[in-house]
Amino acid sequence: MKDTKQQFEHVIAICRDLFAKKLHDYGAAWRIMRPSSVTDQIFIKANRIRSIEIKGVTLVNEGIRPEFIAIVNYGIIGLIQLEQGYAETDDMTEQQALEQYDKHAKAALELMLAKNHDYDEAWRSMRITSYTDLILMKIYRTKQIEALSGNTLVSEGIDANYMDMINYSVFALIKLEFGE
């Protein structure tokens, strides 16, 4: 399990580095996004991954790796937006945004470690295409919860779905980075 924790932290560091660079370039412009828009953005990324997996070819010179990184980052943005609410302007400093990022990345790591203990690293035997399908399923669940204005009977909330999308993406990135 020690390797999994280190690999998770390595992949999150890659995602965070890109997040920080975009934060420098664009500021926290994403603060205006309502959670439903974040969900749609994650959908676009996951749908592109699935399209590439099915077609086996891309016309844009990027593979699936950048899309999984984007899902991690948008998942964390989604968690921030759920907690903070969306804003009418870019109202968060780079430092505040990075502190929020780190807080939610740490929570995702803690959840992954707990689930990984219970599931005994089953994710390592899964195919990357399964992570894609699970992410898409979580997106459709999230859209349904959003349509219900969060009023579910027995389901976890939107935040739990974002956390799972982050963790499935991290698993995919670990496999892409370190192999099977």
Image (spheres, helix red, strand yellow):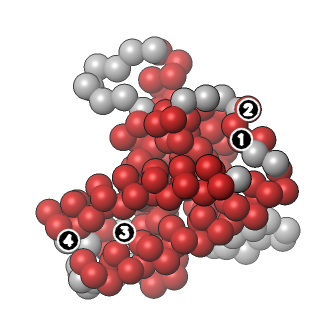
Quadrant that contains the C terminus: top right
The amino acid marked with disc number 4 is Gly
- Nearer to us of marks 3 and 4 is 4
The mark found on residue 123 in the picture is 1
Residue 100's place in the image compared with 158, above or below, is below
Q: Earlier in the sequence, mark 1 or mark 3?
A: 3
Between label 3 and label 2, give the one nearer the viewer. Answer: 2
Mark toward the start of the polypeptide (2 vs 4): 4
**CA distance separating discs 1 and 3:** 31 Å
Q: Residue at label 2?
A: 125
Q: Amino acid at mark 3?
A: Met
* Residue 41, visible in the rendered structure: no
Within 10 Å of disc 1 (Cα), the crowding (few <14, some 14-19, many 20+) is some
Instruction: Indicate left or right for 77 with 175 as reference.
Output: left
CA separation in Å, label 2 and label 4: 39 Å
How many neighbours does mark 2 have within 10 angstroms: few (below 14), some (14-19), or many (20 or more)? few
Residue linked to disc 4: 27
Q: Do the CB atoms of the residues marked 1 and 2 lie less than 8 Å apart?
A: yes
Q: Which residue is mark 3?
A: 33
Image side of residue 125 versus residue 88, left or right: right
Q: Residues within 10 Å of mark 4 (few under 14, many from 20)?
A: some
Q: Quadrant of residue 44?
A: top left
Relative image position of residue 92 (x, y in whole percent):
28, 83
* Residue at x 30%, y 30% (from the top left corner): 62
> SS at mark 1?
helix
Type of amino acid at the residue the image marks with label 2: Ser
